[in-house]
Image (spheres, rainbow, N blue to C red):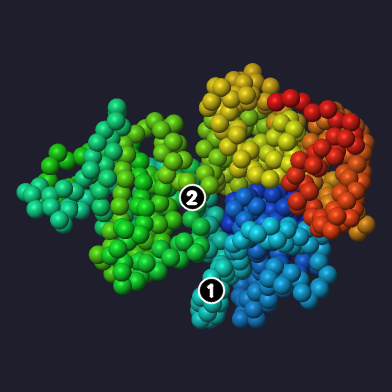
Amino acid sequence: MNKTLFFDGFIERIKTQFNLEQNYAFEIFAIAPFLEMTFSEVFDDVSTLVDGKGNNDGGLDGIYLDQEENKLHVFQIKNKNTIGDNDIHKFLRDYENIFVTGNNSAIPLNKRVQAALDQYTSIVKSGKVIETSLYYIFNGEKSSINENIINRHEQSNPHLRIFDSNDLYAQIELLLLANKKRKDVSFSFMAEKSNISFKNDPQALISFQIQNIKAINFRLKAVKLCELLENEIAVNKSIQSVFSENIRGFLGRTKTNKKIKETLESNYAEYFPFLNNGITIIAEQIKIPQSMQAGEHPIETKNPVIVNGLQTTRVIYDVYKQDRTKLEGVYVLIRLYETNEKDLIDKITDATNTQSPINFRDKMSNKNFNEITKTFFAQKGIDYLTKRGEILSLNADIAYKNMVHSDIVLKFWYASFRESPEEAKNSKSKVLETIYDASIDSEHSLHPLFNGDKNSPVYEQLFTAYSIYKFVLAKRKEKEAEPASSDFVLYADELLSYGLYKKNVKTDADFLSAYDEIYNAIEENVSTEKKLLESNGKNYSHNGYFKSSKCRYDLNQKLNFIESQF
């Protein structure tokens, strides 16, 4: 009953906000929690709807190409309580037709789907491998359909996951829990003794201290690591809170995670500590025994947090839930530190996650400049979202507010006020890393803006960048619905925003006039660039052009813009 009321409330608001039919509103609602996006972000950048309709969508309801991680997310959403074998087959065929064969069947595609295919093709031709996640979500329950259908499809296609309404509700709950304050957790690790030492007190711990920071290395039974997660669930109703906010979430069935699982389930699982880098944990307090106690080495901790080894931990826990006997004789290596110093925690997290992109949005969420920006935007009637879990709220008025993630605002500030539209388009994570560094490094050129001073001009700049972005987005929507318009507009948000900033427009009339001038200039530049490349036997792509500094240089030349010096 609560699930139905919750779903219906949000779907009704989405229908009103975007003027959509019921089924299309459910599509927006279902996609948002899995990508941790606002409904507006899904509607603007993920949904394949054009002008509120799903015409010529290639059979796909949502497409998101994460160019940071070269990962493609493809969605099929059904607002019905049951699905059949043919439904899943069709989704897989539609995906394969678009992204495996490059629309070999030559079906008509709307501009959004075609743009996604063009971007995908451009990245593949550059030599990059793109990982794919396929989501089939329906508004019913798996218990109503043949379980063999789901198992067969998921086992034969490692990219596919089938979710029902309970899975969707659980994903929403995870986001809501992620934004709640963690209750204090106490847990004792039982370090394993050496099996090669013959002294009266066989070694179990490598412990040392640097200034006021304690450190311990030890070997732990894999099942004991799972008990840490079980304890977290008992106290905080979710395992999410045991993982640092600074590292990316569980990546699911990646090649690496598949290999971890294969090792754990193999006949050489006892070698796991030799084949894995182990787990890094930080706790607020640690009690270390001076010697063995009743033949054991207990280590008491308060609020332990896993800052490296999330993927390993989650795979181990999945095996544990399926059959804990497979973990018998399996050990993991643990590095445990005691500290409350936020900067040191960040340093340890960064240093031990060299293979995983750090989520700088989460790291910046509590920085002073972001807190002040949140208040500044609230005064303008806008929800400025800085943390996971804020995209959904039980607040009855939340769907009627404008909502925007901090990383989008910062990205378009970088494109405009930083005058680097191609960098903003190329790598949002690099933009966020630069701003994060500026917030903590007094020597950074941007520190005077992002140091948290309440009198910094950056708050007004961020709001201006947001206003320009919203205008560009609205114009893009209009252009999408115009059959004759150039498709480059789907790639040019950052450059158009840069142009409007350089025009220093103030009124709505000036916005319209300046936009038309900038749009026409970019359209001419695109045509010129295509001809130039074709005359030299090279292929042109919107994705490549708008990620290069040449797009900015060409616009500056066309409209006589003078760049600022940074």
**Which residue is painted at 36% across and 46% down in the image?**
280
Reply above or below: 241 against 100: above
Asked if residue 416 can be seen in this view, the reply is yes
Asked if residue 29 can be seen in this view, the reply is no
Q: Crowding near pointer 2: few (<14 within 10 Å), some, many (20+)?
A: few
Q: How many marks?
A: 2
Reply above or below: 178 against 271: above
**Which residue is painted at 82% across and 30% down in the image?**
502
Q: How far apart are marks 2 and 1 (CA)?
A: 27 Å
Out of 466 and 131, give the one closest to the viewer.
Answer: 131
In the displayed structure, does residue 366 sit left or right of residue 496? left
Label 1: element kind = helix
Out of 163 and 480, give the one closest to the viewer.
Answer: 480
Label 2: element kind = loop
**Which residue is painted at 62% across and 56% down in the image?**
70
In the displayed structure, does residue 293 sit left or right of residue 114? left
**Which residue is painted at 77% across and 26% down in the image?**
564
In the displayed structure, does residue 244 sit left or right of residue 499? left
Classify the position of the C terminus by image quarter: top right
Which residue is label 1 attached to? 154
The circle on residue 202 is: none
Q: Crowding near pointer 1: few (<14 within 10 Å), some, many (20+)?
A: some
The circle on residue 355 is: 2
In the displayed structure, does residue 517 sit left or right of residue 454? right
User: How far across and down, in percent of the image, does residue 226 sit?
Assistant: 33, 57
User: How far across and down, in percent of the image, does residue 155 sit?
Assistant: 51, 75
The residue type indicated by label 2 comes to: Gln
Callout in the foreground (2, 1)? 2
Out of 411 and 206, give the one closest to the viewer.
Answer: 206
User: How far across and down, in percent of the image, does residue 91 sit?
Assistant: 67, 73
